[in-house]
Image (cartoon, rainbow, N blue to C red):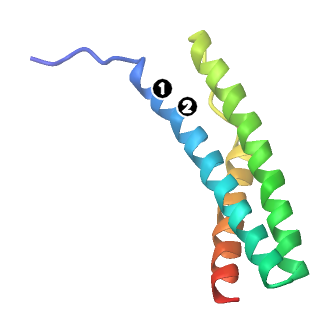
Amino acid sequence: MTQPRDPGLQPERTGLAWRRTALAMTVDAILVMRTGMTSQSRPLMIAGVGLALCALLLIVVSVRRRRQLATGAPTAPGQGLLAATTLAVVAAAGCAVWSMLR
């Protein structure tokens, strides 16, 4: 006996995943900027501001994605958006490692 699939759960999890990614990017940007200020490292400050801008864009994407999912007619995100998000997350991880080794 198979259970019917509930399509409402997957879109909700997807929306939450976008929100978590944006939140993690925001926290990382704040920490990188803080490290840049305390060590007076201009490159770290610039990296932190860049990450903050990426986080802002991810928040906008997250809100738009959540609205799409709420309408019941979600479309898959484009490959460009997925690639940009992946690059932003990798850059955030790199900046976090850089700021820890500083």
In contact (CB < 8 Å): disc 2 and disc 1 = yes
Q: Is residue 48 above or below residue 73?
A: below
- Farthest residue toward the front? 38
Residue, disc 2: 15
Q: Position of residue 64 (x, y in %)?
A: 72, 26
Residue 77 falls in which quadrant of the image? top right
| Image quarter of the N terminus | top left
Return the residue nearer the eye: 41 or 2.
Answer: 41
Residue pointed to by mark 1: 12
Tell me if 51 is positioned left or right of 72 in this view.
right
Label 1 Cα neighbours within 10 Å, binned few <14 / some 14-19 / many ≥20: few
Residue located farthest toward the top when viewing the structure as drawn: 71
Q: How many marks?
A: 2
Is 18 placed above or below 9 here? below
Q: Nearer the viewer, residue 91 or 76?
A: 91
Tag 1: amino acid: Glu
Residue 75 at what x, y percent from top left? 64, 24
Q: Which residue is pictured at 65% across the width and 19% down the height?
A: 68
**Is the C terminus in the top left, top right, bottom left or bottom right quadrant?**
bottom right
Secondary element type, mark 1: helix
Q: CA distance from mark 2 to mark 1?
A: 5 Å
Tell me which corner region of the image, top left, top right, bottom left or bottom right, holds residue 43.
Answer: bottom right
Residue under the image location 78 percent in, 60 percent down: 51
Image quadrant where residue 86 sits: bottom right
Residue at (69% x, 80% y) in the render: 99
Would you say 53 lies left or right of 84 here? right
Left or right position of 34 against 27:
right
